[in-house]
Amino acid sequence: MRVSSVLVVGAGLAGAMAVTALRDQGFAGDVTLLGAEGLEPYDRPPLSKELLTRTAPAWLRDEVGADLAGADIALAEPATGLAVHDDGVTLTTAARELRADAAVLATGAQAVSRPGWEGALTLHTAVDAEALRAAVRPGARLVVVGAGWIGAEVAGVAAGAGAHVTVVEAADAPLEAALGEVGALTTAWYAAAGVRLLLGTRVDEVRADAVVLEDGRTVPADVVLVAVGARPRTGWLGDALPVAPDGALVVDERYRVVRADGPLHHVVAVGDVARRRSPRHGWVSGGHWDGALRGPAAAVRTLLGVPAGPVDDPAPYVFSTQLGHELALYGHPLPTDDVVLRRGDDGFTALWFRPGSSELGAVLAVDRPRDVATARRLFTGPALPRLDRDAAADDARPLKAAALA
């Protein structure tokens, strides 16, 4: 099918890079970019990592060279519905109806909260960050619900600025959902940073002046941040496309949205909104910065019918600065994996091996730039890398020396 017009829905990193990729591929047709926030595309990681030191959005035109030239841009016009036809798509907003030959769906995610917690803040947008920044000041009592990536980052930043911070986590360890047993290794960081950490504790009620715990205890608060994850923003699609139980759009290795009758060649999804089939890692969440940066170029090649070469398969990647430590996670750890640790005076590295095998599924390097560089190289091949487990656990040897041919 010849494509002469493309709708890009969502003006975050994935959407901005999709527009950039269309022009880089020489596409001369009509491109329309729709956003919901009324702001030009900006980078989200600094919202938590640099909450108090970077008070203006990190514009993607400066950060990654996003180029929206020539596109018809509506940054405060969220999509409200979609119809998929054999020869194109029709998208609706509150103001109009748009028709195009193809669509890139990049509407991202939205922070999760709970009914009745409307007095709490969340952190996903620049407006969210502005509200939280105004509330975090020396002496303020901040309660963070959730000890995941965002919760830990904000807790460290706020405590460093003189706020009194309490983190309430329902699991038995920080980052348990992402790292399993390895998350427990970060527990001591909280006290060292002056943060009170309550594990295995659920929140029952959020009030204007306090958080009430399920066991009846009350934690006084001037501000509450709910940081219990994000959900793909796909509610606007209605029943136009099938979504997974977590709200994600399922896409194949070339980012084509998959329906019961197979993948759609003219509708792709990238970034937080997608769950992709990775030839290397299996099904992976799209909520990774590197995937939102690199995935759109591959998705655009799919739309334009560029001859398929090797699948561009960016490894899931998370970078976090939290409580005085630098963390980099490459790959996709599974709950059933065997964990091997490399420990030293300069931090630690956790390695997730597929059960009983030498196949390496993920690497978490903490305060170890050398292992970060090695992990990045390991996950560039078409298959999972293979490492000698004993050699990998020997911290006296470079991690790259454990690689098997």
Image (tube, helix red, strand yellow):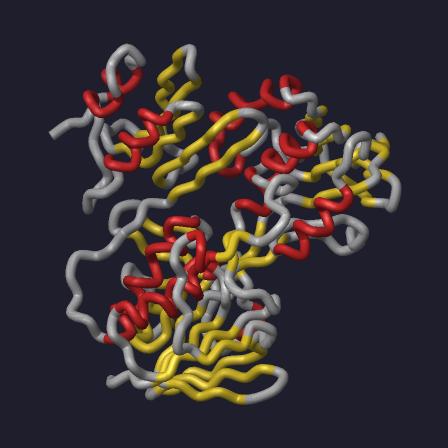
Q: Is residue 3 left or right of residue 128?
A: left
Q: Image check: 235 left or right of 271?
A: right
The residue at 40%/73% (across/down) is: 69
Looking at the image, is 372 positioned above or below residue 260?
A: above
Q: Position of residue 326 (x, y in %)?
A: 47, 29
Residue found at x 52% / y 46%: 45
Name the residue located 40 percent from the left edge and 85 percent from the top edge. Answer: 100
Most extreme residue toward the left is 405
Question: In what quadrant of the picture does the N terminus appear?
Answer: bottom left
Give me the residue at 40% from left, 30% from top.
364
Q: Would you place residue 390 above or below residue 216 in this image?
A: above
**Residue 223 location (% of width, % of height):** 79, 42
Q: Position of residue 51 (x, y in %)?
A: 63, 42
Residue 252 shows in this picture: yes
Q: Is residue 258 visible?
A: no
Q: Quadrant of the C terminus?
A: top left
* Residue 13 vertical position relative to residue 142 in the rendered view, above or below: below
Q: What is the count of numbered marks?
A: 0
Which of the 4 image quadrants contains residue 32? bottom left
Q: Position of residue 163 (x, y in %)?
A: 75, 31
Q: Looking at the image, which is closer to me, 77 or 361?
A: 77
Viewed as shown, does residue 4 lie left or right of 325?
left
Query: Can you tell which quarter of the image residue 310 is in?
Result: bottom left
Q: In the image shown, does 229 or 39 lie closer to the viewer?
A: 39
